[in-house]
Image: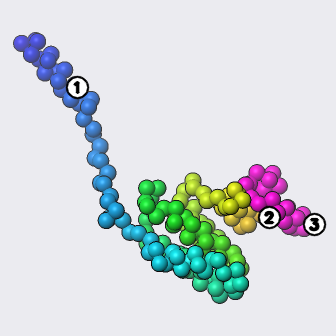
Amino acid sequence: MKVIATVLLLILVTGCSTTNSYNAAPVVTSFDLDRVNQDCAQQVFSRVSNDDAGIGAFLATAENAEACIKDIHFNIDHPDHQLAMKLKAIAVNSYFKAGDISSADAAFNDFRTMFPMQDLVYDDFTSFVDTTTALLQYRQLTSLQLERLNINPVLKNELVRQQRWILQ
């Protein structure tokens, strides 16, 4: 009887240690995901290549980029994750080019919320997040903080020059 009780106890203990007590997350198939409209994204990318755009065109590009990703949740495994990051960055940069700093700041905050701890890299290997932070907060940054940011050297020199003028 003790042998049977011991065997049953071992089976119960072994069974408990291999059973998962959590519910697995539902598997999301590509049919369940909202995707970025590729025509919308292509329109944004074609607008960005127009260097002669005016303020209205920059604002339209920013709004177009944000509309492409509106109401879509992008987790790290979403097939359009990188595309969404690029579109949001284009929106931020377009607001800057239009001179709408408050909208650039709001769009950048959205970027940081949508894509926490993530960044994009420009062609010169500088950071989108660091560059945008420098542009939005250069007056609050110390010279050491500014120096530590991975931003374009020309921009860094200009921001240091601006800081000197502010201090005078």
User: Amino acid under label 2?
Assistant: Leu
Estimate the spatial distance between the alpha carbons at disc 1 and disc 3, rounded to whole Å: 74 Å
User: Amino acid under label 1?
Assistant: Thr
- Measuring 59% from the left and 84% from the top, which residue is drawn there? 60
Image quadrant where one finds the C terminus: bottom right
Measured as percent of width and height from the top left, residue 61 is found at 59, 80
110 vs 2, left or right, is: right
Measured as percent of width and height from the top left, residue 48 is found at 63, 77
Residue 92 has which mark? none
Q: Earlier in the sequence, mark 1 or mark 3?
A: 1
**Labelled pair 2, 3 in contact (Cβ < 8 Å):** no
The residue at which mark 1 appears reads as 14
Q: Earlier in the sequence, mark 2 or mark 3?
A: 2
**Is residue 49 at least partly visible in the picture?**
yes
The residue at which mark 2 appears reads as 155
Estimate the spatial distance between the alpha carbons at disc 1 and disc 2, rounded to whole Å: 63 Å
Callout 3 crowding tier (Cα within 10 Å): few <14, some 14–19, many ≥20: few
- Measuring 11% from the left and 17% from the top, which residue is drawn there? 5
**Which is the main secondary structure of the residues drawn in magenta?**
helix
Q: Earlier in the sequence, mark 1 or mark 2?
A: 1
13 vs 131, left or right, is: left
Tag nearer the camera, 2 or 3: 2
Tell me if residue 115 comes above or below residue 39 in the rendering: above
Q: Which residues are magenta?
A: 142-167
Along the line of sight, the residue nearer the viewer: 132 or 120: 120
Tag nearer the camera, 1 or 2: 2
- Measuring 34% from the left and 62% from the top, which residue is drawn there? 30
The residue at which mark 3 appears reads as 168
User: Amino acid under label 3?
Assistant: Gln
**Is residue 130 at least partly visible in the picture?**
no
